[in-house]
């Protein structure tokens, strides 16, 4: 079903609150306050069963004169927000109806475009916060080369800011805070199809589990064989992972 057809069904079934959508977007669609009030009256007439109110009918409810109503209706048609259609009733008699469907479709299109812009803006904000987080953890400003590398993770490797942030935290936990180390983590994750925070946590958990298991299976050397103490706590070293 096309978007316009689906919108028509929603309107007819009362599933869309036109007034809320309209009041949110009519200024952005360059509809004046007079035209907006006229549209609301047209919509009210249609909801009450009158699909073709005359300028005289509308003027009775408004402070505008009949001529002003007619002028504004003409302007709405010129803007492409209103149409007049001819239809046949059950007896084959021709009649006219006013359609505001072009306006509702424009609002739907604008909502879609606006949502896409909002998503892009949110993504840019997340990316900006990501650079700030790196500077906080590094305790200094990033160099141009470091900034470029992080940008490559985003633009070329297509890692999300959340996944890159998770890789940074892995480096912090391992006390190996360097872009080379983080780059290796992201390389391994990409090779293992890690695309989300959940994937990254699962992947890291499995490696830590294997590391702990290896440590438990380790046989302690005899005291006579010990040459020097080794108090290192085992962790997963991403740089030692084979390609």
Image (cartoon, rainbow, N blue to C red):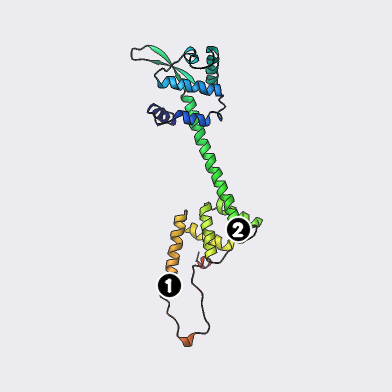
Query: Which badge, 2 or 1, comes first in the chain's sequence?
Result: 2
Would residue 120 be visible to someone looking at this image?
yes
Q: Which residue is mark 2?
A: 136
Q: Position of residue 65 (x, y in %)?
A: 54, 13
**Relative to 57, residue 243 above or below:** below
**Relative to 220, residue 81 above or below:** above
- Residue 92 quadrant: top left
Q: Is disc 1 surrounded by few (<14), some (14 to 19) or many (20+) residues within 10 Å? A: few
For image coordinates 41% across by 13% down, the residue present is 95
Instruction: Please give left or right for residue 221 compared with residue 90 in the image.
Output: right
Instruction: Name the foreground residue: 7 vs 192.
Output: 7
Farthest-out residue, left: 90
How many labels were placed on the picture? Answer: 2
Q: Is disc 2 surrounded by few (<14), some (14 to 19) or many (20+) residues within 10 Å? A: few
Element at badge 1?
helix
Q: Position of residue 228 (x, y in %)?
A: 53, 83
Instruction: Name the foreground residue: 159 vs 37.
Output: 37
Q: Which numbered mark, 2 or 1, is in the foreground of this view?
A: 2
For image coordinates 54% across by 39% down, the residue present is 117
Q: Which residue is mark 1?
A: 214
Farthest-out residue, bottom: 224
Element at badge 2?
helix
- Residue 148 quadrant: bottom right
């Amino acid at each position: 079903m096309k978007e316009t057809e689906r919108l028509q069904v929603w309107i007819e079934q009362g599933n869309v609150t036109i007034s809320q959508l309209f009041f949110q977007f009519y200024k952005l669609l360059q509809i004046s306050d007079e035209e907006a009030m006229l549209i609301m009256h047209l919509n009210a007439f249609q909801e009450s069963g009158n699909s073709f109110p005359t300028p005289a009918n509308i003027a009775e409810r408004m402070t505008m004169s009949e001529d002003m109503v007619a002028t504004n209706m003409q302007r709405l048609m010129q803007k492409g927000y209103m149409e007049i259609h001819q239809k046949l009733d059950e007896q084959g008699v021709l009649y006219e109806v006013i359609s505001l469907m072009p306006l509702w479709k424009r609002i739907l299109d604008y909502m879609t475009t606006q949502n896409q812009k909002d998503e892009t803006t949110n993504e840019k904000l997340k990316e900006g916060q990501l650079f700030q987080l790196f500077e906080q953890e590094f305790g200094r400003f990033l160099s141009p080369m470091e900034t470029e590398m992080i940008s490559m993770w985003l633009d070329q490797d297509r890692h999300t800011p959340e996944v890159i942030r998770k890789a940074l935290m892995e480096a912090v936990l391992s006390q190996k805070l360097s872009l080379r180390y983080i780059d290796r983590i992201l390389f391994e994750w990409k090779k293992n199809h890690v695309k989300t925070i959940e994937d990254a946590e699962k992947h890291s958990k499995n490696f830590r589990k294997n590391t702990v298991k290896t440590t438990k299976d380790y046989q302690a050397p005899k005291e006579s064989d010990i040459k020097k103490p080794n108090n290192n706590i085992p962790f997963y070293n991403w740089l030692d992972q084979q390609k």
